[in-house]
Amino acid sequence: MILKMSKVSIIGPQRLLPEVMACIYEAGVLHIETTPERIKDTPYIKRLSLPPEQKNEMMELERVTGLAKKTIDTLTPLFVKLPPVDDRHKEAGVHEAKRIIEEISRSVDNVDQEIRGLGHQLSLYARYEKILDTLSPLIAMMPESPFKDYTGVTLYKREAPLTVLEESLQRMTEGRYELFKRDIDSEIMACVIAYPKEFGPGIKKLFQEGNISELRMPADLADMPIRESFKVISEKRAALPFQISALEKRLQRLAFERYGELVQCHRIVEERLRQMEVSSDLYGTKDTFFLSGWIPEEALSKFTKNIKNRFQDRVILGRIPPTDQERDRIPVVLNNPGFLRPFEVLTRFLSLPKYGTLDPTPLLAIFFPVFFGLILGDIGYGAILLLASLWLRWRWKNRELLYNIGCVLTASSLVTMIFGVIFGEFFGTLGESIGISPYINRSQTLIPLLILSVVIGGLHISLGLLIGVIIAMKRREAREAFTKLFKLLFVFSLFTAAASFYGILPAEWGYVFVLSGSGIILVLIFLEKWIAPFDALKLIVNVLSYARIMGFGAASLFLASIANRMATMPESVILGILLGIFFHLINVIIGVYAPAIQTLRLHYVEFFDKFFYPGGIEYKPFGKGERW
């Protein structure tokens, strides 16, 4: 159901605004509305501006909030296990919360920067991996000498022939050089050249003129001899992963020890920032402020009492009747009993209903499990789904979305098992082998089940149209109400005519209702113009769409039967069992996915558009409210 809301306005002196906002925030039930344009344009009314010191505080809070979010994003992937509950900072002041955020962020950022720096070094040294592996044995072969220099070069075999390089070195050093070479791959060759130090400048010039790539070491090793550089790179390549691992463990420890504290302090700072943002968006006169908002009817009395007790007559709280223009801007609170609440997740998948219309959650709670069970209808598959849903609820009991989905699947699995008993199906035809007798054999009653599915569709859509008529009348939309009423009569005429032609009702009734259906289309043309014939055709298609209940149910049964036959084909019993399990597992996956999708489609496409008004505004109370 949708809670009834009341609109209230609060007027008071500007000097009490911080106290009033704190009181509203503590109550946590008022959805503050943006100031309407008609008030903004009123003479002597202007937007309230914060004092300079509060503006500075607001900028500081925005900076700290951004810092906290960045740190939380860093720690969240590492936050594996919830640490012991620590309420020390639950009531911490804003200044204390800011200090803690700064401290934790600084510690996390320092470790994170170290990890990034070492990771950059490791990726840099990894670029030398192939050359290092190639040249290290060559360098080890070279005799050490304080009078010699060593230079590494890479040559593209086709562009810079080795013989040309050797001739140039022979001529320049008069044969006083050594060259060690090894192929890196089919195109590139690595060489290490040893030569007397006095020939260094000339050889460097030779490399530049010959467009020969001299091996460049990383910047932090550029001044080292090549032999020492290679040694350092080898050592760091081996040591850096261990250093990075140690820092990552340190970061994980920070996440475990201080994540909850960080989130709590971030919430405190964010709450204060939210209060200041709302205050800066209010309007008033030179000395007064004005705000309005929406509050659940059942919370109004207590909220009014709190304001009056705290501020006496200095702050005026009044109830304002909403205008027709405000009808679609009233925030929506879905408030269903505990056993229905999990089905709200199916409503929210589409959109919130507008205020003053119908919350379809109770209808979903009735029809979704029934349609799902009709399609799957198997004791064995229902039992597997029940176990899976119970595990989902246990494993994700702190994740509202997943827990609610688990509850929906639990209800659907129980209905599936009930229909499995009616159909006598236990992993398809395996039920017959263990003595389960069907009350209705789906494999032999496809046509009656098809007719039943279409009848269910007609009743379901008729219910949607009836609800649509009631809602349209409630919203004072007379034309919409009459349109849906005549569509309901058109569906009734269709089914009555069909019953007459099949002999359920007298045959002469069929012609009467065919004529009445034609007359209804003429009325709809008057109400909806040229779109009426298409809407009439759409209604017929909508009703026939419910045939998918029988179709997908029969498909599930036949797939289960095929799985059982596949299990008996191999000569090996073990192989047959494995094949049967495999194909039944495939059918379980399809059997859960298909009924869920098809049932949602029947509701969202065929059923909801008869009465559902999407686009409701979500109720977002200002403050710490948790009940709604």
Image: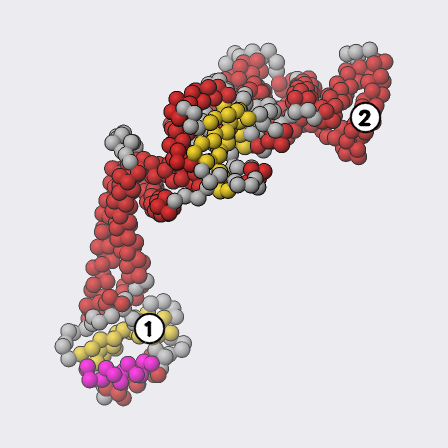
Residue 542 is one of the magenta-drawn residues: no
Is 105 located above or below residue 570 in the figure? below
Q: Are marks 1 and 2 in contact (CB under 8 Å)?
A: no
Q: Nearer the viewer, residue 293 or 11?
A: 11
**Horizontal placement of 358 versus 9: left or right?**
right
Residue with the mark numbered 2:
523
Which quarter of the rendering shows the C terminus?
Answer: top left
Disc 1 packing (10 Å; few <14; some 14–19; many ≥20): many
Give the percent coordinates (x, y) of residue 281.
47, 40
Q: Residue at x 59, y 11 (%)?
A: 439
Is 589 located above or below residue 60 in the figure? above
Residue 462: tell me if it is visible. Answer: yes
Q: Residue at x 23, y 82 (%)?
A: 200
User: Which residues, given as a range, are shown in magenta?
Assistant: 196-208
Quadrant position of residue 119: bottom left
Which of the numbered marks, if any, corresponds to residue 154? 1
Which of the numbered marks, if any, corresponds to residue 113? none
Give the percent coordinates (x, y) of residue 374.
58, 20
